[in-house]
Amino acid sequence: MERHLLMSLKELRRKGICEDVLAGRLTLREGSRQLVLSYRQMLRVYERFESEGVKGLVHRNRGRPSNRRKAEALRTKALARYEERYADYGLGPTLAAEKLAEEGLVLDHETLRRWLLSGGLWKKRRKRRAHRSRRERKAHFGELVQMDGSHHEWFGSQKPRSCLMNMVDDATGTTEGLLAEQETTEAAMQLLWRWIEKYGVPVALYTDKKSVFVTDREPTLEEQLADEAPLTAFGKACKKLGISIITANSPQAKGRVERKHAVFQDRFVKELALRRITTLAAANKLLNNGFIQSLNEKFAVAPLEPKSYHRPLGPGVELADIFCFETVRKLHNDWTIRHGQRYYQITDDNRPLPRPKDKILIRVRLDGTVALLYRDKELHFECLTPKKLQARHEQSQKKTEPFIRPKKKPETKWRPNCRRQMANIGRR
């Protein structure tokens, strides 16, 4: 019966050298140099070739099970647990290995990948060829932070799409996230607020050209006179903090945050499904209570330079007065001011007291509170309720009613009293 011998390329090369040594075309010293082996190792290989023939060059462990292989019971238990718990959610080998380790089934993700492929529970994914060259990371933590929103079905196809606001440091890959209904100015402000409280004020933000971050409107007359560029509410907040906003011309330019979106869309979606979370509040609680920290511990890297470029807040700076919406209005003659559907009454205990037609800065904070400022000083005011507005309107109507004089009696023509005149003549 004819038998076939399976040999590697290295073993085939050794076979050719040993045959040359046997035929006298090479010496053992020359053969060892060509095979990059020591002389003693070459001598052992040649002696085995002489005694056993070509079979002696084949690795003796070929076809035998490895001494470091996992127990068959562990393999059976791991595959059964994956198929029972994680297969329906589409967990890949890497994330599934982490989840199995939390349950006490510790094994390498590549080992699990091979088991899943052999069991038909996982398919290889085709890797796309990189289209653009990768930009080098910044050297310092906080030198550049990328910000973007990811619209996705975070709670499954049965729920409406939400937006995950994401910030990623360019130097380290440190991330921070916030889940909101849409990519709004409030969500961007809240996320940047959270970042500053954790790490400090970054030098620059790298964003896209959405209207949340930049605007293409024409400058107002006041902006033209002050030689200022038009800014969004988020842009004004960044200007107060000294943060530069750099806009990208393509998604690939801010690829670090785009790749982080893929991590969230893989891991965070599956974590929400495993925990059966379907609300924004519960999802943000999960983000804050360990999920973001676990991602940073796993994927963040050390910066090239140890010095952080984050800056602390200045003395007396309140982030509530930075992340807000500001509008300028003129004061009415009755010391009231209107903003939206509300009227505010400036009280007379303010010093200095603004005069009618003066400009008042209205500041609406993220928590809904309102502040009125005149010459950078907060004013005391009263919010007029609909009942008070009605009373003021009735009082003003009374004051403005025109004065109507009572009608005079119709004038009569004067006629002399003849009897009295005759009596006076008789007396004379």
Image (cartoon, grey):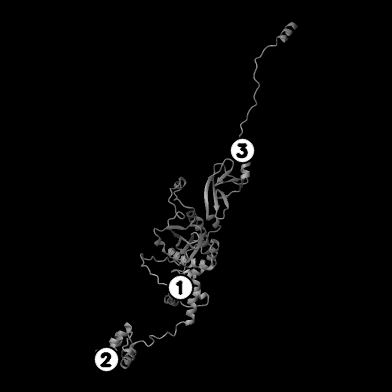
Amino acid at pointer 2: Leu
Q: Characterize the local packing of mark 3: few (<14), some (14-19) or many (20 or more) Cα atoms within 10 angstroms.
A: few
Measuring 56% from the left and 44% from the top, which residue is drawn there?
Answer: 337
Query: Mark 3 = which residue?
Result: 396
Residue 159 falls left or right of residue 399: left
Q: Which residue is mark 1?
A: 94
Label located before the other in sequence (1 or 2): 2
| Mark 3: amino acid | Ser
Q: Which residue is mark 2?
A: 22
The CA distance from mark 3 to mark 2 is 121 Å
Residue 317 in view here: no
Badge 1 amino acid: Thr
* Front residue (pair 170, 129): 129
State how far apart marks 1 and 3 are (Cα). Answer: 74 Å
Q: Position of residue 201 (x, y in %)?
A: 50, 61
The crowd level at tag 2 (other Cα within 10 Å; few <14, some 14-19, many 20+) is some
| Residue depth check, mark 1 versus mark 2: number of the one nearer the observer | 1
Q: Residues within 10 Å of mark 1 (few under 14, many from 20)?
A: some
Q: Nearer the viewer, residue 151 or 347?
A: 151
Q: CA distance from mark 1 to mark 2?
A: 51 Å
